[in-house]
Image (cartoon, rainbow, N blue to C red):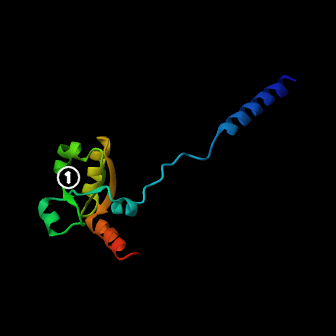
Amino acid sequence: MLKRTISGYIFASVLALTACKSNHTATVPKPNIKEVVNSADVTLVDVRIPEQYEAGTAKGAINIPLAEIQNNIDSLKGKKVVVFCNKGIQADQAMEILKKNGVEAYDGTTWKNVKAIQDEKQSGK
């Protein structure tokens, strides 16, 4: 009798624990970078050095080199910011700095990627 009671408690405990278990984890939807880049209120920030920026960048982008991002946090707060560079490495670093400081930042990866998104919208695709 005691064995059956203990088995019952174990079964009930396992059942209770698995009943509360959820396979669904809350996920935050990833923003569509195309929508962000093409939104009217976005600030596009090229984090490359000025010489690279001057050689070519996305339309409407401002240049704040990665080394100067920390000093420009206040001017970027409250804005929707897309950062990009040549290969995405500096953009990733800029993202860390901006997010850590409460800036709504998005990773555009490369300037060519952001420019292609802009060109795609202009051609109506």
User: Are there few (<14), some (14-19), or many (20+) residues within 10 Å of tag 1?
Assistant: many
Answer above or below: position of 69 versus 21: below
The quadrant in which the N terminus is found is top right
Residue furthest right as drawn: 1
Q: How many marks?
A: 1
Residue toward you, 38 or 101: 38
Which residue lies most toward the front here? 40
Q: Residue at x 14, y 66 (%)?
A: 54
Q: Left or right: where does residue 68 sit relative to residue 26?
A: left
Report which residue position mark 1 lands on.
Answer: 66
Residue 45 at x, y percent in the picture = 24, 57
Q: Is residue 119 above or below residue 92?
A: below
> Could you tell me which secondary element the residue under label 1 belongs to?
helix
Q: Position of residue 90 (x, y in %)?
A: 24, 55
Q: Measured from the top left, where is residue 41 in percent x and y?
A: 32, 55
Instruction: Please tell me which residue is depicted at 63% across the width and 43% down the height of the picture.
Output: 22
Question: Along the horizontal axis of the image, is 39 left or right of 52?
Answer: right
Look at 36% across and 71% down and name the residue there. Answer: 121
Residue 112 lies in quadrant: bottom left
Instruction: Looking at this view, name the residue that lies furthest to the bottom.
Output: 123
Q: Amino acid at mark 1?
A: Leu
On-image quarter of the C terminus: bottom left
Q: 106 or 15: nearer the eye?
A: 106
In the rendered structure, the answer to whether residue 68 lies left or right of residue 39 reads left
Residue plotted at (24% across, 66% down): 59
Q: Quadrant of residue 17?
A: top right
Give how far across and how far down residue 21 sits, in percent. 64, 40
